[in-house]
Image (cartoon, rainbow, N blue to C red):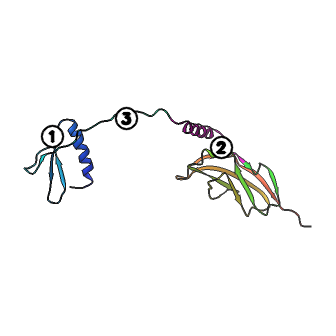
């Protein structure tokens, strides 16, 4: 008999005992115990099993306030809009050395447990990050577009998406 079936058999045994059926038990020469509802041969004897106790389940209605507050925050953030707060739309950036710091609003905080923020610069997806801010290097002079997404860490589904903003990179003139 397969050992994986033993727990199932025991469960069936307890269920059968609750119905006042007789269960027979036999331990073979290898030490394996066999159970049956019928006495298959003279080696089987009536099993002395403990009575089955059934405890009804009750639904849990009282949730802690902190869990409730987290749910409320997640619900509110799910309804709110994802926006890019840095750089600002149509902002001119001077003398950054090609670095840009991108940041989204605090809406994403409640969503961050199973999600990540991904920025898209000039139509190119950047690797997702666990934080609300990312610094990008190699963004040089000219007009650039930036979009943010909140994506699920596991299935990569887009949860929220910001509007696309435009910003301008300038370099200081050499005199």
- In the displayed structure, 46 sits above or below 126; it is above
**Distance (Cα) linking label 2 and label 1:** 62 Å
Which image quadrant is residue 53 in?
top left
* Residue indicated by mark 2: 107
On screen, 102 above or below 106? below
Label 1 secondary element: loop
* Foreground residue among 62 and 116: 62
Q: Quadrant of the C terminus?
A: bottom right
Query: Which region of the structure is painted magenta?
Result: 63-84
Q: Which residue does the numbered mark 3 point to in the structure image?
A: 57
Task: In the rendered structure, find residue 112 and report the number of the disc placed on it.
Answer: none
Q: Nearer the viewer's eye, disc 2 or disc 1? A: 1
Q: Quadrant of residue 50?
A: top left
Q: Residue at x 14, y 51 (%)?
A: 26
Horizontal and vertical percent position of residue 41: 8, 50
Front in this rendered view, residue 125 or 106: 106
Pinpoint residue 118: horizontal percent, then vertical percent.
63, 53
In the visual, does 144 lie left or right of 19?
Answer: right
* Gap in angstroms between the C-alphas marked 3 and 2: 38 Å
SS assignment at label 3: loop
Tell me the number on the disc at residue 22.
1
Res. 63 in view: yes
């Amino acid at each position: 008999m397969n050992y994986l079936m033993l727990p199932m058999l025991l469960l069936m045994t307890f269920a059968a005992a609750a119905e006042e059926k007789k269960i027979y038990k036999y331990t073979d020469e290898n030490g394996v115990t066999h159970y049956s509802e019928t006495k298959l041969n003279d080696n089987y004897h009536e099993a002395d099993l403990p009575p089955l106790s059934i405890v009804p389940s009750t639904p849990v209605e009282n949730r802690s306030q902190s869990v409730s507050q987290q749910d409320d925050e997640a619900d509110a953030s799910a309804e709110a809009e994802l926006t890019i707060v840095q750089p600002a739309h149509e902002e001119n950036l001077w003398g950054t050395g090609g670095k840009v710091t991108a940041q989204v609003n605090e809406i994403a905080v409640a969503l961050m447990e199973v999600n990540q923020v991904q920025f898209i610069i000039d139509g190119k997806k950047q690797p997702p990050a666990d934080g609300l801010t990312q610094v990008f290097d190699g963004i040089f002079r000219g007009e650039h577009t930036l979009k943010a997404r909140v994506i699920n860490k596991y299935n990569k589904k887009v949860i929220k998406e910001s509007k696309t903003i435009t910003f301008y990179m300038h370099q200081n003139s050499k005199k």
